[in-house]
Amino acid sequence: MTPSTTRRVNAITLPQYATFTLGFLSLVALLSWMCPQFISQAHAATAFVGGAGSGSFGSRISRGTRRTQGQTTMLASARRSRSTRPLPYPVRFAVLGGGSFGLALASVLGKKSIPVTILVRKEDVAEHINLHHRHPTYLSDISLAPTIRATTIPEEALNDASFIIHAVPVQYSRKFLEDIAPHVPKNTPIISTSKGIETGTLCMMQDILLETLGPNRETAYLSGPSFAREIALGLVTAVVAASESEALANEICDIMGCNYFRVFTSTDVVGVEVGGAVKNVIAIAAGMCEGLGLGTNAMAALVTRGCNEMQRLALSLGARPTTLTGLSGVGDTFGTCFGPLSRNRNLGVRLGKGEKLEDILGSSTEVAEGHATAFSLVQLIEKTNRAYRRELEFPIIYGVKEILEGKRTPAEGLRDLMAMPVRVEMWNL
Protein backbone atom coordinates (compact mmCIF):
# COMPACT_ATOMS: atom_id res chain seq x y z
CA MET A 1 0.00 0.00 0.00
CA THR A 2 1.40 3.41 -0.99
CA PRO A 3 1.75 6.27 1.49
CA SER A 4 -1.01 8.23 -0.25
CA THR A 5 -3.37 5.24 0.00
CA THR A 6 -2.54 4.86 3.69
CA ARG A 7 -3.37 8.51 4.32
CA ARG A 8 -6.73 8.11 2.52
CA VAL A 9 -7.60 5.04 4.60
CA ASN A 10 -6.66 6.79 7.84
CA ALA A 11 -8.65 9.86 6.86
CA ILE A 12 -11.73 7.68 6.39
CA THR A 13 -11.19 5.37 9.35
CA LEU A 14 -10.94 7.90 12.20
CA PRO A 15 -14.19 9.81 11.52
CA GLN A 16 -16.01 6.54 10.93
CA TYR A 17 -14.62 5.18 14.20
CA ALA A 18 -15.74 8.29 16.07
CA THR A 19 -19.23 8.24 14.56
CA PHE A 20 -19.66 4.53 15.25
CA THR A 21 -18.39 4.87 18.83
CA LEU A 22 -20.62 7.81 19.75
CA GLY A 23 -23.66 6.19 18.17
CA PHE A 24 -22.99 2.91 19.95
CA LEU A 25 -22.50 4.58 23.33
CA SER A 26 -25.74 6.55 22.88
CA LEU A 27 -27.57 3.29 22.22
CA VAL A 28 -25.96 1.70 25.29
CA ALA A 29 -27.04 4.66 27.47
CA LEU A 30 -30.64 4.48 26.22
CA LEU A 31 -30.91 0.73 26.70
CA SER A 32 -29.31 0.81 30.14
CA TRP A 33 -31.77 3.47 31.35
CA MET A 34 -34.79 1.55 30.12
CA CYS A 35 -33.44 -1.93 30.89
CA PRO A 36 -31.20 -2.03 33.98
CA GLN A 37 -30.41 -5.71 33.44
CA PHE A 38 -28.58 -4.70 30.25
CA ILE A 39 -25.99 -2.68 32.15
CA SER A 40 -23.55 -5.49 32.85
CA GLN A 41 -23.25 -6.34 29.14
CA ALA A 42 -23.03 -2.63 28.37
CA HIS A 43 -20.02 -2.20 30.65
CA ALA A 44 -18.14 -4.90 28.83
CA ALA A 45 -19.06 -3.58 25.40
CA THR A 46 -18.15 -0.02 26.31
CA ALA A 47 -14.78 -1.11 27.63
CA PHE A 48 -14.10 -2.91 24.33
CA VAL A 49 -15.15 -0.02 22.10
CA GLY A 50 -13.41 2.61 24.23
CA GLY A 51 -10.15 0.72 24.20
CA ALA A 52 -7.22 1.26 26.52
CA GLY A 53 -5.15 4.37 26.77
CA SER A 54 -5.77 7.78 28.16
CA GLY A 55 -6.92 9.30 24.88
CA SER A 56 -9.69 6.83 24.05
CA PHE A 57 -13.35 7.81 23.81
CA GLY A 58 -14.19 5.31 26.56
CA SER A 59 -11.78 6.82 29.07
CA ARG A 60 -12.89 10.37 28.32
CA ILE A 61 -16.56 9.47 28.76
CA SER A 62 -15.73 7.61 31.98
CA ARG A 63 -13.95 10.67 33.32
CA GLY A 64 -16.87 12.83 32.25
CA THR A 65 -19.32 10.92 34.45
CA ARG A 66 -17.45 11.89 37.59
CA ARG A 67 -18.56 14.97 39.50
CA THR A 68 -16.46 18.10 39.64
CA GLN A 69 -14.80 19.24 42.88
CA GLY A 70 -17.33 19.71 45.68
CA GLN A 71 -19.53 16.91 44.37
CA THR A 72 -19.37 13.21 45.07
CA THR A 73 -18.47 10.55 42.53
CA MET A 74 -21.56 8.60 41.50
CA LEU A 75 -21.46 6.38 38.44
CA ALA A 76 -24.71 6.44 36.52
CA SER A 77 -24.65 2.72 35.82
CA ALA A 78 -24.51 1.94 39.54
CA ARG A 79 -27.50 4.18 40.20
CA ARG A 80 -29.50 2.43 37.50
CA SER A 81 -28.73 -1.10 38.56
CA ARG A 82 -28.94 -0.86 42.36
CA SER A 83 -32.73 -0.53 42.47
CA THR A 84 -33.21 -3.86 40.67
CA ARG A 85 -31.45 -5.94 43.33
CA PRO A 86 -33.30 -7.45 46.31
CA LEU A 87 -32.90 -5.49 49.53
CA PRO A 88 -30.23 -6.93 51.86
CA TYR A 89 -32.23 -6.06 55.01
CA PRO A 90 -35.90 -5.72 56.05
CA VAL A 91 -37.33 -2.19 56.07
CA ARG A 92 -40.60 -0.62 57.08
CA PHE A 93 -41.89 2.81 56.09
CA ALA A 94 -44.17 5.27 57.83
CA VAL A 95 -45.95 7.85 55.68
CA LEU A 96 -47.05 11.08 57.37
CA GLY A 97 -50.23 12.29 55.71
CA GLY A 98 -52.91 10.46 53.79
CA GLY A 99 -53.11 12.77 50.79
CA SER A 100 -52.63 11.76 47.17
CA PHE A 101 -48.84 11.92 47.08
CA GLY A 102 -48.35 10.02 50.32
CA LEU A 103 -50.69 7.34 48.98
CA ALA A 104 -48.80 7.22 45.68
CA LEU A 105 -45.44 6.63 47.34
CA ALA A 106 -47.00 4.07 49.67
CA SER A 107 -48.27 2.33 46.54
CA VAL A 108 -44.75 2.20 45.07
CA LEU A 109 -43.43 0.59 48.24
CA GLY A 110 -46.42 -1.72 48.60
CA LYS A 111 -45.87 -3.14 45.12
CA LYS A 112 -42.39 -4.11 46.31
CA SER A 113 -43.96 -5.90 49.33
CA ILE A 114 -42.47 -3.35 51.74
CA PRO A 115 -44.64 -2.80 54.85
CA VAL A 116 -46.04 0.73 55.06
CA THR A 117 -48.10 2.42 57.77
CA ILE A 118 -49.88 5.66 56.84
CA LEU A 119 -50.54 8.12 59.65
CA VAL A 120 -53.88 9.84 58.98
CA ARG A 121 -55.99 12.25 61.02
CA LYS A 122 -59.41 10.55 60.97
CA GLU A 123 -60.25 7.16 62.41
CA ASP A 124 -62.90 6.44 59.75
CA VAL A 125 -60.31 7.01 57.01
CA ALA A 126 -57.88 4.59 58.68
CA GLU A 127 -60.62 1.98 59.03
CA HIS A 128 -61.66 2.37 55.40
CA ILE A 129 -58.07 1.93 54.16
CA ASN A 130 -57.51 -1.14 56.34
CA LEU A 131 -60.83 -2.74 55.36
CA HIS A 132 -61.10 -1.86 51.67
CA HIS A 133 -57.43 -1.27 50.74
CA ARG A 134 -58.18 2.13 49.20
CA HIS A 135 -58.62 5.70 50.42
CA PRO A 136 -62.24 6.91 50.64
CA THR A 137 -61.43 10.31 49.07
CA TYR A 138 -58.02 10.53 47.40
CA LEU A 139 -57.19 8.15 44.53
CA SER A 140 -60.24 6.23 45.68
CA ASP A 141 -60.40 4.16 42.49
CA ILE A 142 -56.89 2.73 43.00
CA SER A 143 -56.36 -0.34 45.20
CA LEU A 144 -53.53 -0.40 47.74
CA ALA A 145 -51.32 -3.40 48.40
CA PRO A 146 -52.14 -5.57 51.45
CA THR A 147 -48.81 -4.55 53.03
CA ILE A 148 -50.20 -1.00 53.41
CA ARG A 149 -52.24 -0.11 56.46
CA ALA A 150 -53.31 3.10 58.19
CA THR A 151 -53.58 4.39 61.75
CA THR A 152 -54.30 7.59 63.66
CA ILE A 153 -51.88 6.69 66.46
CA PRO A 154 -48.37 8.20 66.00
CA GLU A 155 -46.63 5.58 68.18
CA GLU A 156 -48.13 2.78 66.12
CA ALA A 157 -46.96 4.29 62.84
CA LEU A 158 -43.52 5.48 63.91
CA ASN A 159 -42.24 3.13 66.58
CA ASP A 160 -40.23 0.73 64.43
CA ALA A 161 -40.10 2.66 61.13
CA SER A 162 -36.86 2.39 59.16
CA PHE A 163 -37.73 5.49 57.10
CA ILE A 164 -40.38 8.20 57.45
CA ILE A 165 -41.92 9.91 54.43
CA HIS A 166 -43.26 13.37 55.23
CA ALA A 167 -46.13 14.18 52.84
CA VAL A 168 -47.92 16.99 54.69
CA PRO A 169 -48.27 20.42 52.96
CA VAL A 170 -45.58 22.88 54.00
CA GLN A 171 -47.94 25.36 55.65
CA TYR A 172 -49.21 22.66 58.02
CA SER A 173 -45.93 20.84 58.55
CA ARG A 174 -44.53 22.68 61.57
CA LYS A 175 -47.57 22.09 63.80
CA PHE A 176 -47.92 18.50 62.60
CA LEU A 177 -44.26 17.69 63.28
CA GLU A 178 -44.26 19.38 66.68
CA ASP A 179 -47.21 17.21 67.71
CA ILE A 180 -45.60 13.92 66.72
CA ALA A 181 -41.97 14.80 67.59
CA PRO A 182 -41.95 12.83 70.88
CA HIS A 183 -42.82 9.66 68.95
CA VAL A 184 -40.29 9.99 66.12
CA PRO A 185 -37.36 7.55 66.63
CA LYS A 186 -34.11 9.43 67.14
CA ASN A 187 -32.10 8.00 64.23
CA THR A 188 -34.85 7.41 61.66
CA PRO A 189 -34.23 9.35 58.41
CA ILE A 190 -36.96 11.66 57.09
CA ILE A 191 -37.81 11.87 53.37
CA SER A 192 -39.75 15.06 52.68
CA THR A 193 -42.00 15.43 49.64
CA SER A 194 -43.47 18.81 50.68
CA LYS A 195 -42.76 21.75 48.37
CA GLY A 196 -42.98 25.39 49.29
CA ILE A 197 -41.85 28.09 51.72
CA GLU A 198 -43.51 28.60 55.09
CA THR A 199 -45.34 31.89 55.43
CA GLY A 200 -44.08 34.17 58.18
CA THR A 201 -40.82 32.34 58.90
CA LEU A 202 -39.79 31.94 55.21
CA CYS A 203 -38.44 28.50 56.14
CA MET A 204 -38.03 25.68 53.66
CA MET A 205 -38.64 22.10 54.73
CA GLN A 206 -34.99 21.52 55.66
CA ASP A 207 -35.32 24.33 58.22
CA ILE A 208 -38.68 23.15 59.54
CA LEU A 209 -37.42 19.59 60.02
CA LEU A 210 -34.34 20.85 61.85
CA GLU A 211 -36.33 23.10 64.17
CA THR A 212 -39.06 20.56 64.99
CA LEU A 213 -37.18 17.24 65.10
CA GLY A 214 -33.73 18.46 66.12
CA PRO A 215 -30.25 18.23 64.59
CA ASN A 216 -28.14 15.16 63.84
CA ARG A 217 -30.87 13.52 61.77
CA GLU A 218 -30.43 12.51 58.13
CA THR A 219 -32.99 14.04 55.80
CA ALA A 220 -33.73 13.87 52.08
CA TYR A 221 -36.00 15.82 49.76
CA LEU A 222 -37.87 14.10 46.93
CA SER A 223 -38.84 16.22 43.95
CA GLY A 224 -39.42 16.06 40.21
CA PRO A 225 -42.28 15.82 37.69
CA SER A 226 -44.45 13.36 39.59
CA PHE A 227 -48.23 13.46 39.59
CA ALA A 228 -49.60 11.19 42.30
CA ARG A 229 -52.20 9.48 40.11
CA GLU A 230 -49.67 8.52 37.46
CA ILE A 231 -47.31 7.10 40.09
CA ALA A 232 -50.10 5.09 41.69
CA LEU A 233 -51.11 3.73 38.27
CA GLY A 234 -47.56 2.53 37.67
CA LEU A 235 -46.78 4.98 34.86
CA VAL A 236 -43.10 5.75 34.26
CA THR A 237 -41.85 8.51 36.56
CA ALA A 238 -38.39 9.92 37.33
CA VAL A 239 -37.59 11.95 40.46
CA VAL A 240 -34.52 13.15 42.34
CA ALA A 241 -33.69 12.54 46.00
CA ALA A 242 -31.53 15.35 47.37
CA SER A 243 -29.61 14.90 50.59
CA GLU A 244 -26.41 16.09 52.20
CA SER A 245 -25.87 12.41 52.97
CA GLU A 246 -24.85 10.54 49.84
CA ALA A 247 -25.44 7.25 51.69
CA LEU A 248 -29.07 8.15 52.43
CA ALA A 249 -29.71 9.28 48.86
CA ASN A 250 -28.33 5.98 47.58
CA GLU A 251 -30.47 4.01 50.05
CA ILE A 252 -33.59 5.79 48.82
CA CYS A 253 -32.57 4.97 45.26
CA ASP A 254 -32.11 1.30 46.23
CA ILE A 255 -35.33 0.93 48.15
CA MET A 256 -37.83 3.03 46.22
CA GLY A 257 -36.57 2.56 42.69
CA CYS A 258 -38.31 0.05 40.43
CA ASN A 259 -38.99 -0.54 36.74
CA TYR A 260 -41.39 2.42 36.52
CA PHE A 261 -40.20 4.70 39.36
CA ARG A 262 -36.64 5.94 38.82
CA VAL A 263 -34.85 7.77 41.61
CA PHE A 264 -31.79 9.87 40.81
CA THR A 265 -29.62 11.48 43.48
CA SER A 266 -28.29 14.95 44.28
CA THR A 267 -26.51 16.74 47.11
CA ASP A 268 -27.99 20.16 46.21
CA VAL A 269 -30.80 20.38 48.76
CA VAL A 270 -31.26 24.15 48.32
CA GLY A 271 -31.60 23.89 44.54
CA VAL A 272 -34.14 21.07 44.77
CA GLU A 273 -36.21 22.87 47.41
CA VAL A 274 -36.23 26.23 45.62
CA GLY A 275 -37.16 24.57 42.33
CA GLY A 276 -40.04 22.74 43.99
CA ALA A 277 -41.35 25.96 45.53
CA VAL A 278 -41.06 28.34 42.58
CA LYS A 279 -42.51 25.95 40.00
CA ASN A 280 -45.89 26.04 41.77
CA VAL A 281 -46.08 29.82 41.38
CA ILE A 282 -45.07 29.61 37.72
CA ALA A 283 -47.79 27.00 37.25
CA ILE A 284 -50.43 29.42 38.54
CA ALA A 285 -49.24 31.96 35.96
CA ALA A 286 -49.28 29.29 33.24
CA GLY A 287 -52.83 28.37 34.22
CA MET A 288 -53.94 31.97 33.96
CA CYS A 289 -52.38 32.09 30.52
CA GLU A 290 -54.47 29.05 29.58
CA GLY A 291 -57.62 30.49 31.14
CA LEU A 292 -57.22 33.70 29.16
CA GLY A 293 -56.91 31.69 25.94
CA LEU A 294 -53.55 33.19 24.99
CA GLY A 295 -52.24 30.19 23.07
CA THR A 296 -49.12 28.04 23.05
CA ASN A 297 -46.64 30.79 22.13
CA ALA A 298 -47.53 32.86 25.17
CA MET A 299 -47.56 29.83 27.46
CA ALA A 300 -44.11 28.65 26.34
CA ALA A 301 -42.65 32.15 26.68
CA LEU A 302 -44.10 32.66 30.14
CA VAL A 303 -42.88 29.31 31.47
CA THR A 304 -39.40 29.90 30.06
CA ARG A 305 -39.15 33.33 31.63
CA GLY A 306 -40.46 31.86 34.87
CA CYS A 307 -37.62 29.33 34.84
CA ASN A 308 -35.20 32.25 34.54
CA GLU A 309 -36.65 33.74 37.72
CA MET A 310 -36.37 30.36 39.44
CA GLN A 311 -32.72 30.06 38.54
CA ARG A 312 -31.95 33.65 39.53
CA LEU A 313 -33.42 33.15 43.00
CA ALA A 314 -31.90 29.70 43.53
CA LEU A 315 -28.40 30.84 42.60
CA SER A 316 -28.65 33.78 45.00
CA LEU A 317 -29.37 31.27 47.78
CA GLY A 318 -26.40 29.06 46.94
CA ALA A 319 -27.90 26.44 44.61
CA ARG A 320 -26.01 24.89 41.71
CA PRO A 321 -27.19 25.99 38.25
CA THR A 322 -27.25 22.42 36.94
CA THR A 323 -29.88 21.46 39.51
CA LEU A 324 -32.35 23.92 38.02
CA THR A 325 -31.97 22.34 34.57
CA GLY A 326 -32.78 18.91 35.98
CA LEU A 327 -35.83 17.00 37.18
CA SER A 328 -36.50 19.20 40.23
CA GLY A 329 -36.16 22.42 38.22
CA VAL A 330 -37.37 22.66 34.65
CA GLY A 331 -38.59 19.05 34.73
CA ASP A 332 -41.05 19.63 37.56
CA THR A 333 -41.95 23.03 36.12
CA PHE A 334 -42.89 21.59 32.74
CA GLY A 335 -45.00 18.87 34.33
CA THR A 336 -46.80 21.28 36.64
CA CYS A 337 -47.36 23.99 34.04
CA PHE A 338 -48.55 21.78 31.20
CA GLY A 339 -50.07 18.80 33.03
CA PRO A 340 -53.87 18.66 33.45
CA LEU A 341 -53.50 17.04 36.91
CA SER A 342 -51.72 20.07 38.41
CA ARG A 343 -53.66 21.73 41.23
CA ASN A 344 -51.67 24.98 40.87
CA ARG A 345 -52.21 25.15 37.13
CA ASN A 346 -55.93 24.51 37.55
CA LEU A 347 -56.11 27.30 40.14
CA GLY A 348 -54.60 29.64 37.55
CA VAL A 349 -56.94 28.42 34.80
CA ARG A 350 -59.98 29.22 36.90
CA LEU A 351 -58.59 32.64 37.82
CA GLY A 352 -57.94 33.35 34.14
CA LYS A 353 -61.55 32.48 33.34
CA GLY A 354 -62.78 35.04 35.85
CA GLU A 355 -63.62 32.96 38.94
CA LYS A 356 -63.03 34.49 42.36
CA LEU A 357 -60.12 33.19 44.41
CA GLU A 358 -62.28 32.54 47.49
CA ASP A 359 -64.66 30.36 45.46
CA ILE A 360 -61.78 28.38 43.94
CA LEU A 361 -60.10 27.72 47.29
CA GLY A 362 -63.42 26.86 48.92
CA SER A 363 -64.24 24.22 46.31
CA SER A 364 -60.81 22.55 46.30
CA THR A 365 -60.26 19.31 48.24
CA GLU A 366 -56.46 19.48 48.04
CA VAL A 367 -53.97 22.28 48.73
CA ALA A 368 -52.50 24.32 45.88
CA GLU A 369 -49.16 25.14 47.52
CA GLY A 370 -48.38 27.92 45.04
CA HIS A 371 -51.03 30.19 46.58
CA ALA A 372 -49.22 30.65 49.91
CA THR A 373 -45.77 30.22 48.35
CA ALA A 374 -46.23 33.26 46.09
CA PHE A 375 -46.42 35.56 49.12
CA SER A 376 -43.50 33.84 50.85
CA LEU A 377 -41.32 34.06 47.74
CA VAL A 378 -41.83 37.81 47.43
CA GLN A 379 -40.88 38.25 51.10
CA LEU A 380 -37.83 36.01 50.63
CA ILE A 381 -36.71 37.96 47.55
CA GLU A 382 -37.06 41.27 49.38
CA LYS A 383 -35.10 39.88 52.31
CA THR A 384 -32.20 38.43 50.29
CA ASN A 385 -32.07 40.54 47.11
CA ARG A 386 -30.64 44.04 47.25
CA ALA A 387 -31.75 45.16 43.80
CA TYR A 388 -33.50 48.53 43.64
CA ARG A 389 -36.41 47.29 41.48
CA ARG A 390 -36.83 43.64 42.42
CA GLU A 391 -40.11 43.39 40.53
CA LEU A 392 -38.14 43.93 37.32
CA GLU A 393 -35.98 40.89 38.08
CA PHE A 394 -38.92 38.72 39.19
CA PRO A 395 -41.95 40.09 37.29
CA ILE A 396 -43.85 36.79 37.12
CA ILE A 397 -43.51 35.95 40.82
CA TYR A 398 -44.47 39.50 41.81
CA GLY A 399 -47.30 39.56 39.28
CA VAL A 400 -48.86 36.31 40.54
CA LYS A 401 -48.68 37.57 44.13
CA GLU A 402 -50.46 40.82 43.23
CA ILE A 403 -53.17 38.98 41.31
CA LEU A 404 -53.75 36.67 44.28
CA GLU A 405 -53.97 39.77 46.49
CA GLY A 406 -56.66 41.18 44.21
CA LYS A 407 -54.58 44.21 43.23
CA ARG A 408 -54.88 43.38 39.53
CA THR A 409 -56.67 40.95 37.25
CA PRO A 410 -54.93 38.26 35.19
CA ALA A 411 -55.55 40.33 32.05
CA GLU A 412 -53.98 43.39 33.68
CA GLY A 413 -51.03 41.27 34.83
CA LEU A 414 -50.43 40.17 31.23
CA ARG A 415 -50.65 43.76 29.99
CA ASP A 416 -48.12 44.95 32.54
CA LEU A 417 -45.79 42.03 31.76
CA MET A 418 -45.81 42.85 28.06
CA ALA A 419 -45.20 46.54 28.81
CA MET A 420 -41.92 45.87 30.60
CA PRO A 421 -38.76 47.27 28.97
CA VAL A 422 -37.03 44.85 26.60
CA ARG A 423 -33.55 43.70 27.64
CA VAL A 424 -31.03 40.92 27.03
CA GLU A 425 -32.73 37.53 27.46
CA MET A 426 -30.38 36.03 30.07
CA TRP A 427 -29.71 39.31 31.90
CA ASN A 428 -28.09 39.00 35.35
CA LEU A 429 -27.89 35.20 35.41
Image (tube, rainbow, N blue to C red):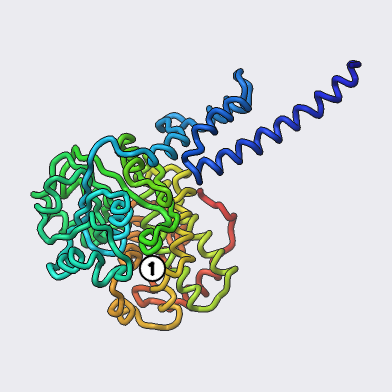
Q: Position of residue 286 (x, y in %)?
A: 47, 68
The residue beneath circle 1 is: 344
**Farthest residue in the top direction?**
2
Residue at 35%, 60% (x, y): give it: 232
Count of numbered circles in the view = 1
Q: Position of residue 348 (x, y in %)?
A: 42, 73
Q: Quadrant of residue 279?
A: bottom left
Residue at 24%, 40% (x, y): give it: 218
Q: Is residue 314 something that shows in the picture?
A: no
Q: Is residue 133 left or right of residue 388?
A: left
User: 102 and 48: which one is in front?
Assistant: 48
Q: Is residue 147 left or right of residue 294?
A: left
Q: Position of residue 43 (x, y in %)?
A: 53, 30
Residue at 40%, 62% (x, y): give it: 230
Q: Is residue 368 left or right of residue 32?
A: left
User: Above or below — where is 93 with respect to 60?
Assistant: below
Q: Secondary structure at mark 1?
A: helix
User: Above or below — where is 374 with respect to 7?
Assistant: below
Q: Quadrant of residue 399?
A: bottom left
* Crowd class of label 1 (few under 14; some 14 to 19; many from 20; radius 10 Å): many
Q: Position of residue 365 (x, y in %)?
A: 28, 74
